[in-house]
Amino acid sequence: MNKIRKIPTEMEMIEQLRRGKVLLPPLSFRLLKGGTELRGNLFRFDALVEVSWGENKAKLVVECKSLSTPKVFQNGLNLLKTSLLPKGCRPLLFVPFLSELQLQELEREGISGIDLCGNGVVVVPEEIAVFRSGGKNRYTSSAPIKNIYRKNSSMVGRAFLLSAGYGTVQEIRKSINRRNFLLNRWKKKPMSLSTVSKCLKTLEDDLIVTREGTIRLLQPDKLLDKLCENYEPPAARERVLLKIPEKNRTVLELLSNLSQELDLPLMASGSSSVARYAVMERGNLLSVYCPRVERLLERLPGIQADRFPNLELVETESETVYFDARQEGDFWWASPLQVYLELMAGDKRDQETARQIKSLILKNFELVIPCGLCRRE
């Protein structure tokens, strides 16, 4: 089991190089110079190391970064690609963790890279070529919020899939709170400005959002993938299956009327909202999210039944599932994004339908994001 460790400072990382603690078999590294010894007018690097493999040796100038975010990686890579190097030296990027995709990018650029987890690529033409991956990340995330793509903080990312750009952080916060269905109908606490700012920092580090000029979305497809990878179904305090007689009123009309009479927010689940955005045959069961199921049960006709039910009540106060609920008449339906996330967590048939909705979500951004900014990985 890999123990999670605190991310070291750049000085501590250089010290590990000095002490021979950075390993990439069959290579060995020896620190020649570090810190202020290298910082002249032309060569502003963090260290000079000698890498050896038997009789083959080479000198590498090191750009050291204490963070491993995509933005930091890209900045380090760009610096090494454009900087003037000392004669006879090759560039090397040194960070706490390198993913396999990052190692492959370094290899394509002809730049070496090593981390503190046993991963690395060292490229010295006609001398040394080593590529090693698979080491797990043993260092905690530097993000202010542990996971911004999950639970309430994911509403910041979700807001960018509704509008590609915002003028200010305050504008983002206002949009989130306006679209938070439970905030408006169930007296939930508004999202704070500091939470929005912290989430924006991670979105920027992940190269999903840029804050150059306006605050705008760069990679909608990557953001959608992140939200999907980290999606968790809402925590349900109670699930009740009912068989409701449909004589004078449909189940939908009955629920709409009760929602208004009881001042109780109701919304169809993502799985029951599919027909609003894609073609998919569903059964007669209507699944509905509600923060207080017992209040509905007191007024609903019919019986609880596991066989042939036509209504499922799911009690949850998860703000994310209600986020950006869409009103049609007197009833509310889940947003296209919520439908997509729920379908992607389902079976193969659900996931095939989810692709229709993904195209619908991303189509809006192909019209507003310049081609050079919308990158696909």
Image: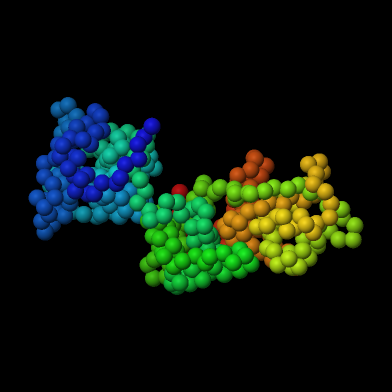
Q: Is residue 103 above or below residue 219?
A: above
Residue 366 seen: no
Query: Residue 22 versus residue 309: which sits nearer the camera?
Result: 309
Farthest residue in the right direction? Answer: 247
- The residue depicted at 30 percent of the width and 35 percent of the height is 118
Residue 272 in the figure: left or right of residue 29: right
Q: Position of residue 17 (x, y in %)?
A: 18, 40
Q: Is residue 118 above or below residue 77?
A: above
**Rendered image quadrant of residue 325:** bottom right
**How many circles with numbers are drawn on the protein?**
0
- The residue depicted at 32 percent of the width and 33 percent of the height is 132
Residue 248 in the figure: left or right of residue 175: right
Q: Is residue 133 above or below residue 361?
A: above
Residue 145 seen: yes
- The residue depicted at 49 percent of the width and 50 percent of the height is 226
Q: Position of residue 331 (x, y in %)?
A: 73, 64
Q: Quadrant of the N terminus?
A: top left
Farthest residue in the top direction? Answer: 54
Q: Is residue 4 above or below residue 174?
A: above
Q: Position of residue 121 (x, y in %)?
A: 29, 38
Q: Position of residue 234 (x, y in %)?
A: 60, 50
Query: Residue 256 versus residue 60: which sits nearer the camera?
Result: 256
Q: Which colour style is shown?
A: rainbow
Residue 202 in the figure: left or right of residue 361: left
- The residue depicted at 19 percent of the width and 29 percent of the height is 53
